[in-house]
Image: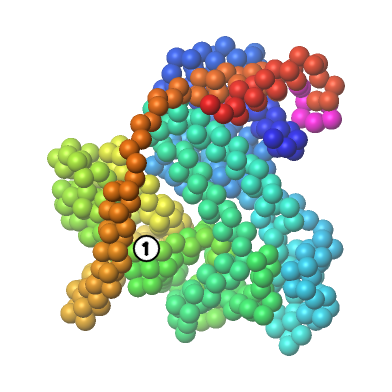
Amino acid sequence: MRLTAFVRLLRILHIFTRYRLDQILLDLPLPLLGRLLLQLGPWRLRPAPKDLSRGARLRKACEDLGPVFIKFGQILSTRRDLMPDDIALELARLQDKVPPFPGPRARARIEEQLGERIEDVFASFSDEPLASASVAQVHAARLKDGSEVVVKVVRPGIGETIDQDIQWLFVAARLLERVSTEGRRLRPVEVVEDYESTIFDELDLYREAANASQLRRNFEDSELLYIPKIYWDWCRHKVLVMERIEGIPVTDLPALADQRTDMKKLAERGVEIFFTQVFRDSFFHADMHPGNIFISRKHPWEPQYIAIDFGIVGSLTPEDQSYLARNLMAFFKRDYRRVAQLHIDSGWVPADTRVNEFEAAIRSVCEPIFERPLKDISFGQLLLRLFQTARRFNMEVQPQLVLLQKTLLNIEGLGRQLYPDLDLWSTGQPYLERWMRERMLPQNQVKHWQQHLERVPALIDSAHRALDNLADAPLREQAPQRPRWPLQLAGIALVVFGASALGGDDPQLWLHAAPTQWALIALGGWLILRRR
């Protein structure tokens, strides 16, 4: 273990004990040994902050631990199928804002990526960033041809920081899966894997540029949505150059009112954009929170959205599109048996799921919602309740559907902020029905079956290889292995005990700690990391 990683672990454990996050773990059905270690640990001598709820304590811990944990907390806040509502609501308050790094460092980073001096590429470049976040920051500039652009540059050293923190998240997730049945149900390793994929994708600005280019092509000449132009000649993996847009922030309701924007049409167009991306294009902007959305100042009677920040996108397979559309149609017909059967047919829940039990669970969740007027029904909350119910029936995590549900909640919340009487279902239903009719047209069915037939030779080859491998594989007996988690729990207890006794937040003070404390930390670290 590198020294920096070890110091980081001590910092994490110190914050853990400061906010008494052990109390959150005690809410899980842990084994007896785990509960004893948590209840008898020295951190219990430190009182929990009385003025903070458990969600607020977790939020503040993420804020103290920095960008990686802030973004992880933001992702957890969208996983309402996993997190209790009180914790999810607190984590949703996390803000991805950090102090900017100096302009000269940004210049050096850009020149390193472009292989040219700033002055040779840009007619002007502002050292003062327009915005700064955990992964990157944005500067205004002008190209030699006079084009006004923004330059997004990845924060130096952030990749190493992310990698280090994610490894500790994996350690915690694997341990939680081993010691708790509830932990296994929540599939924490899958959650961390999903986060790892998301955050490393955000580090690759070339990928973000490609996402923006795809969305721009999908909405070319559209009155609904404008996507800024990408300047490919100056894009690299750590630098993105994009057209600078001018618009009104979507949350600036007074400014929208001043230019007499048609708010009803604006809200409905947001819903239309969502359904267009999901069902026509199968490619959707999955980070459409208000900070990434502006409204064009042109023709306010036909308002047009402008989107930025394309690091997170989602897509659906044709099969997922079909099952999602049929699920939504069945939902609003209150055909709960159809909803349950579609989940089983799609493989979203195990094939041996009892349809009657699943149907009854869905009905108990949905009926109270449907008793409200349509304009008061939350589409996103409906999907959320469905996912929470399906998780109880061992629904496999569907990352694309989680992104979809998060995006829908954003669109719905934004639409009702603009126009409180927005009826999302009445707005989206005609589009959904039209998509389903078009999908059943003969020419589209022929195209669908052609795509399946093209896969047949590859499937036959795969089957042959699998049979050959099965025939050649020697029979092996796996010797039973003792579980490691009891020793790992003991190791964590020793490390936390030592870390909580170090005192203070400054690593310089830790150097003066007693040898006994360091011996406990070292022994605990060895127990955590030792092999079988």
Q: Does residue 174 belong to the magenta stretch?
A: no
Asked which secondary structure carries label 1, the reply is loop
Q: Nearer the viewer, residue 209 or 479?
A: 479
The residue at the point 80 percent across, 16 percent down is 515
Q: Does 505 appear above or below 30? A: below
Expressed as whole percent of the image width and height from the top left, the position of residue 56 reads 57, 34
| Chain part drawn in magenta | 501-509
Q: Nearer the viewer, residue 218 or 172?
A: 172
The residue at the point 82 percent across, 81 percent down is 120
User: Can residue 267 be seen from the camera position used here?
Assistant: no
Residue with the mark numbered 1: 316
Query: In this rendering, would 134 be left or right of 23?
Result: right
Q: Does 363 appear above or below 425? A: above
The residue at the point 73 percent across, 52 percent down is 157
Q: Does 283 appear above or below 468? A: below
Q: Nearer the viewer, residue 340 or 447?
A: 447
Question: Which quadrant of the view contains residue 49?
Answer: top right
Expressed as whole percent of the image width and height from the top left, the position of residue 188 reads 46, 38
Which secondary structure type mostly characterizes the magenta part of the structure?
loop
Amino acid beneath label 1: Leu
